[in-house]
Amino acid sequence: MMEGEVEEEPEFVPLRKKQRNDYGQEDNHVPSYYQETSEASNRSEEDIDGEHCPNPTTNFYEMGLPTDIIYRLFHLGIEYPTPIQMQCCPAILSGRDVIGNAETGSGKTLAYVLPLLVHLRHRMQSETSVEPNRGPIGLILVPTRELVEQIFQEIEKFTSPTRNPYLSHTIPTTHQHEYLPQVQEYRDGDLLYSHVTPNLPTAKILGVIGGVSVQSQLSSIHRSGVDVVIATPGRLLDLIDRGAITTDRLTYLVFDEADRMLSLNMEDQLRKFVAGCTQSVRQTLLFSATMPTSVTRLARSAVMNPIYIAVGEVGQLAQSVIHNVVFVDNKDKRSSLLRLLRETPRPPVIVFCNHSYVVDRVVDWLKEEQFHAVGIHSNKSQNYRNTVMKTFREGGVDVLVASDLVSRGIDVAEVEHVILYDIPDTIEDYVHRSGRTGRKGREGYCSSLLTWHCKIAPELKKLLREAQQQMPVELERDTRLFGKDIVSTEFGDHPRDKMKYKSLR
């Protein structure tokens, strides 16, 4: 955005009359998913590795969770743990380091949030005195700002606010206003809540992200300390360098979406942070949907004697998603997108594009066709992005057109249809984009517009075949023609190699 230019505020006019169910219990909910206990209890050695692995549990009572947390789970409509939770929760609660691999939408966030709540309870009750500007007990590192907010909200579900939520940049500086309720609209700033659960002392949970004022975050920490931090690596290191956050109290460390952080060239930042952790007793958890060499390298330096847990095929498609790959010429992508949207029974829908300018262009097209669509990408301000995601979750947006910004970790259970207007350049991103539907066992659909420009045709063909999904004949025949120099004519697109081959025959 050019200097002095005012960003247009998103217009949100919900088209649906029925509000979404808070617990995600839609018509296509599949409760039997939570009862497939054989997935966790009958594993091969390749699925679970490590010395003295705790046995998996089939319900939350067997995990030894406090009763109030179990009641809260039931209140949220969560009666049974998912397979990743069945194995991870006992391992984490036993104090072991864990490396977890699970398909997207498997419930891995809750797999480390539940043990974190128990860990907080024991630590805070055992502490006799803590300095006002104390460092955190728990720290969760994630790759994007949107994930910071989502995990923050996930933890908030299991806590009751001791006061209304407020943003750290709006905290009054005078003592007489310190405990007055603050009701503020969301503006650029970090998240700060004070929470309490039964038998748990007041816990300060802070979400810190880049792109906003660091001064508000500094004042929040210096004023009352913090017990749990959810952060992106860059801003966390900035606060550590300023002396605002220390690691001498840190005993619970989580790397979530580790493969994504490393793909964004954050390896040096993560290694610098791990090297600076001085706490001799620390439990470290690393979660990743894929396991490239860079993640293995990070794991070797961050975890000790870990338990390795893989649920499902790592890097494979979610079994709950039906894939519909449609081969089209580039000139027909717009009409194909409109057809797919009109065939969708009900919103919300996510449409993925590879570039920011394509996101904006698609949004304009959809608005012309009277779709209630909003775009989100990295060139939008943080305030705009937060507003869009909040409104999308609440049902105020029917079509979210997005870049890869929301392809990982963003969980909106009601999304039944994801459309890949552009197929990404890596197969890992395809897995994550398609995984925005079919969350936690609910049935979902992923439609992809395949053109000759696709750079991952061989990997996509292999992935679809392994998942026993249908594919177009163009993909079945010869993937070597994809991703080459393309000739566009009024009759459609043609790979130059194919035209040359035909001319020689």
Image: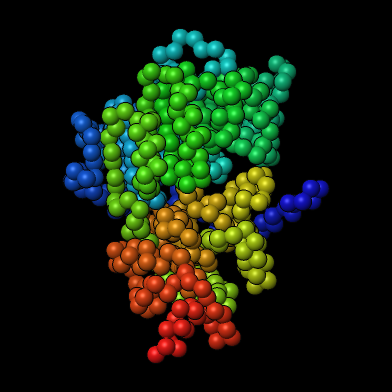
- Residue 334 x/y as whole percent: 58, 74
Identify the residue at image location x=77%, y=51%.
Answer: 2
Identify the residue at image location x=34%, y=44%.
Answer: 101
Tell which residue pokes out farthest to the front in this image.
Answer: 504
- Residue 433 x/y as whole percent: 46, 57
Q: Nearer the viewer, residue 34 or 76?
A: 34
Tell which residue pokes out farthest to the right in this image.
Answer: 4
- Name the image quarter holding the C terminus: bottom left
- Residue 315 x/y as whole percent: 35, 53
Residue 449, visible in the rendered structure: no
**Left or right relative to 161: residue 68:** left
Q: Looking at the picture, does residue 335 appear above or below residue 89?
A: below
Identify the residue at image location x=38%, y=30%.
Answer: 302
Q: Looking at the picture, does residue 143 appear above or below residue 171?
A: below
Q: Nearer the viewer, residue 76 or 454?
A: 454
**Left or right relative to 426: residue 384:** right
Identify the residue at image location x=66%, y=50%.
Answer: 380
Q: Quadrant of residue 251?
A: top left
Q: Nearer the viewer, residue 6 or 109?
A: 6
- Residue 180 x/y as whole percent: 67, 24
Tell which residue pokes out farthest to the top in this image.
Answer: 128
Q: Nearer the viewer, residue 266 or 369?
A: 266
**Left or right relative to 478: residue 328:** right
Residue 10, visible in the rendered structure: yes
Q: How many marks?
A: 0
Q: How is the image coloured?
A: rainbow
